[in-house]
Image: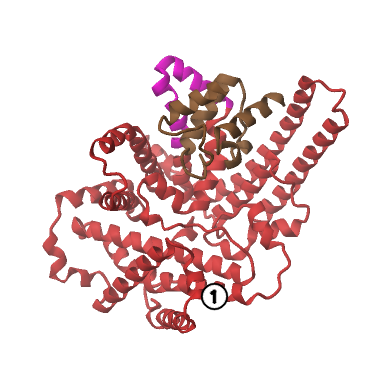
Amino acid sequence: MVVTILTTYLITIEIGKLHTRRDIFLKENKATLSRDEKKAYREIIKAKQKKLLILCLFVDLGILAVLKYTNFAISNANAVLRLFHSQEISFMDLALPMGISFYTFQTVGYLVDVYRGKYLPEKNLGKLALFVSFFPQLIQGPISRFDDLSKTLFAEHSFDGRNVTFGLQRILWGFFKKLVIADRILVAVNTITKDPENYQGIFVFIGMLFYAVQLYADFTGGIDITIGIAQVFGIKVQENFQRPFFSKSITEYWRRWHITMGTWFRDYVFYPISISSPMLKLSKTSRTKLGEKIGKRVPVYLSSITVWFATGIWHGASWNFIVWGLMNCFVIIVSQEFEPFYSKFHNRFNLRGTYGFRLFQVMRTFLLMCSIRILDCYRDVGTSFKMFGTMFTKWRFSDVFQGALLDLGLEKSDYYVLAIGVVILVMFSLKQRSGNVWEKMENGPLLLRYAINIVLLISVITLGAYGIGYDSNQFIYNQF
Amino acid sequence: MEALMNILQELHPEVDFKTNESLIDGKVLDSFDIITLISEIHEEYDVRIPVDEIIPQNFNSAEALYRLIERLQDE
């Protein structure tokens, strides 16, 4: 992290100096230079800045690549070497710094923004280091933007009781999700997914639903804790979720789930690739060769595939995540292609907007996302697809009613807790639709507010999953 | 302006681009549309819209987008 911070600091300062030099030169020579001369000067400066940008990206992303992906590369190389019966390469013992993917992305975002001239570089090394290493978001994000976070991160703060109250409530809510729900249901998810020989068919379906609950409670709970801690200090961290499980399409889902990662990939990978010179050239060629309709899709889809490949591998150095990313891309492209059919269908049956159809869309998106997420759960891609298949070939509904649910490592009481917990989660999300729940609580009866907070606190203390097999220090996303 | 209107209309025939001023905020245009637009504008006006200009203010209305094209042509 120190290398990342120092390199980025020094290089962004140089890029900033070039911005200033360019602006002064163009201002001083405004009257004497022709349009072409100004353009040529801008291009000279841009070329110098680009070299610096590439150097910094090489260092920042290089560290991430070496530490995170070396062993993945070795395992793939070994698979090839095995085919030729050659000697295999031994794995390297590399320690992965906590939150490396998050702070690297945050730093790269800052670097690119300075390069694009969105804002001037931070001259105070301490402030830049604070931005990169701001502790609450180090574990699992959100991936903040410098111009957004710096507004409150570097501001002077005086004690604000409202911020402290809101922050503490948010932390409590986060712990409730994490300790009472996520860490409890995790036991059943692990039992099912670590034993694919015995748990197939309907158990894969149950595991898939349970994992959706676990991931949601774990990740959003962690982010609640992060935002809450920051809020106690008067610092505003960007929201990362917007009730994603109520999305009506997969594209909408990705606008509402892990928002800061989605916008990061959009701004720093998708757009730059899509509108780069080679892509614009390709767009022209593909239109002439393949016709207007298909031709213009080529660059968009090519960029999408690249982005989803990158998103997949960012999540983890394994083929499971790469295939997971590409599956997301596949569904998005297919739904994009089917759009004219959907329109025809809606024009004919006029169902769009009806409650029943919206509910169908929400359920469809949820189940689709759950199915793709199976790849997160099983040891390899082959097993994931096989298990997905068993949902259709080995479905025995009776299995569940013969006490098998109680063999998953959870007691009856755990299921009651989980059922109540999930109902609370759903109710909270429904309330959130018409505005911020914490502000509503603030304006509601004081007694109710106290009652809710006390119940949450007691639940976390007494119902939090602290026993053997539970590891509350681990968040699913901190491995990324 | 007419050429830009044609490009937009072809992308979303159902939208009234003369009056709509919240193409991004109202989620009319998504990132796929933006890429297609940029590529078509490049073809039509020989202007490259850089990534840092992809902000809601520049894409929220046909008028704003046209102003951006003119500004970039002048630079």
Counting from the top left corner in percent of width and height, residue A462 is at 39, 83
Q: Is residue B4 above or below residue A332?
A: above
Tell which chain the image draws in red: A
In the image, taking residue A166 as reference, residue B13 lies left or right, namely: left
Could you tell me the amino acid type at mark 1?
Answer: Leu
Tell which chain the image draws in brown: B
Main SS of the magenta segment? helix
Residue in the image at 51% along x and 37% along y: B20
Q: Nearer the viewer, residue B30 or A260?
A: B30
Q: Is residue A386 above or below residue A344?
A: below
Q: Nearer the viewer, residue A425 or A114?
A: A425
Q: Is residue B40 above or below residue A255?
A: above
Q: Is residue A85 above or below residue A133?
A: above
Counting from the top left corner in percent of width and height, residue A271 is at 54, 36
Provide the secondary structure element on which disc 1 rests. Answer: helix
The quadrant the N terminus of chain A occupies is bottom right
Identify the magenta region: A277-305
Protein image colouring: by chain
Picture mark count: 1
Residue B71 is inside the magenta segment: no
On the question of residue A19 being in view, the answer is yes
Counting from the top left corner in percent of width and height, residue A309 is at 45, 40
Residue in the image at 59% along x and 68% along y: A231
In the image, taking residue A409 as reference, residue A57 lies left or right, namely: right
Query: Pointer 1: what residue?
Result: A168
Residue A297 is inside the magenta segment: yes
Dot 1: chain letter: A
On the question of residue A194 being in view, the answer is no
Q: Nearer the viewer, residue A263 or A195?
A: A263
